[in-house]
Amino acid sequence: MTKLLKVPNHIAIIMDGNGRWATKRGLPRNLGHKEGVNAVERTIKSCLKYGIRYCTFFAFSTENWKRSKEEIDGIFDLLRSYISKDNNIFIENQIKLSSIGVIDPFPDDLKKALNDLKEKTKNFDKLEVVFALNYGGRDDIVRAVNKLIKQGNEINEKDILLSLDTGDIPEPDFVIRTSGEQRLSNFLLYQMAYSELYFPKVYWPDFNEKHFVKALKAYQKRNRRFGGLS
Ligand code: IPE
Ligand code: IPE
Ligand code: MG
């Protein structure tokens, strides 16, 4: 493992720019998503190399259902083939796969492939990769609060934090959104209260180890105060 001083424990990534990457080349948008899968694989390898413990990838938002059926089906196909490979990066490197969001509306075979791989990797602890699938930060909060009100007690901040889909993993230290857009698009809203944000211009399909290291170096220069004094 390559040691860099002070790496984030949990990196969360808004993988944006797949469509523009493809359109710029005169290609259909889904080829941008296809190339985006390679960027996911590269980034997982970088996480292993630099000792990141948790990496969350925003793969499909609760708002992405507004896209064409063709694009959505294409994303599902890519996801299905990525996680269905026999010798995949998760098994080979002892990486735990988990997901956040509500996968109920996804195709049955995709849900099965996802659940199978989650089951096979559940005891691995080298790195945890979290796919955010049909995930929305507001939806996450609403579902957490609904769970809590059933218990009938007054609730506090910690109760909400622990009832979110990310309840058993730490809050993200560092959030990267590629493609130059500077917004959160309903990602981990509650969990990002004190995350450091970083917006490189690169489109997601081009994101590589060089960009990853540059991002880590930017993170190292941040002074996290959490409302106190440094
Ligand atoms: C991000 O790339 C991937 C998903 C939202 C699934 P986009 O598809 O949003 O790419 P742009 O923003 O149109 O370039
Ligand atoms: C956010 O990107 C969702 C994912 C990366 C999965 P979008 O491209 O959907 O966000 P907006 O529409 O530009 O805000
Ligand atoms: Mg986008």
Image (cartoon, grey):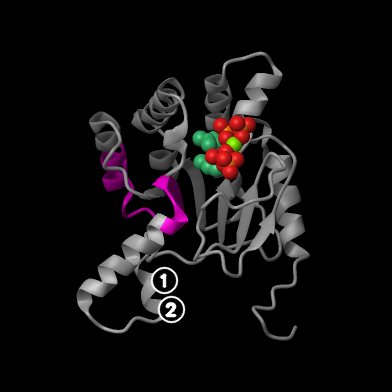
Q: Residue at x 22, y 80 (%)?
A: 152
Mark 2: secondary structure:
helix
- Marks 2 & 1, CB-CB < 8 Å contact: yes
On screen, residue 4 above or below 101: below
Could you say which quadrant of the image residue 69 lies in? top left
Residue 200 placed where, x, y %?
73, 45
Q: In the rendering, at what x and y percent does residue 66 appear?
A: 45, 34
Residue at 69%, 44% in the rendered image: 181
Please provide percent x and percent y for residue 151.
21, 76
Q: Residues within 10 Å of mark 1 (few under 14, many from 20)?
A: some
Q: Nearer the viewer, residue 148 or 111?
A: 148
Going 61% across and 55% down the picture, which residue do you hit?
Answer: 175
- Which secondary structure lies at badge 1? helix
Decide if residue 59 is on the left or right side of residue 81.
Answer: right
Which residues lie in the magenta part? 114-138
Q: Is mark 2 within 8 Å of ligand 2?
A: no
Q: Which residue is mark 1?
A: 161
Q: Is residue 50 magenta?
A: no
Give the residue displayed 45% in from the left and 49% down from the top.
129
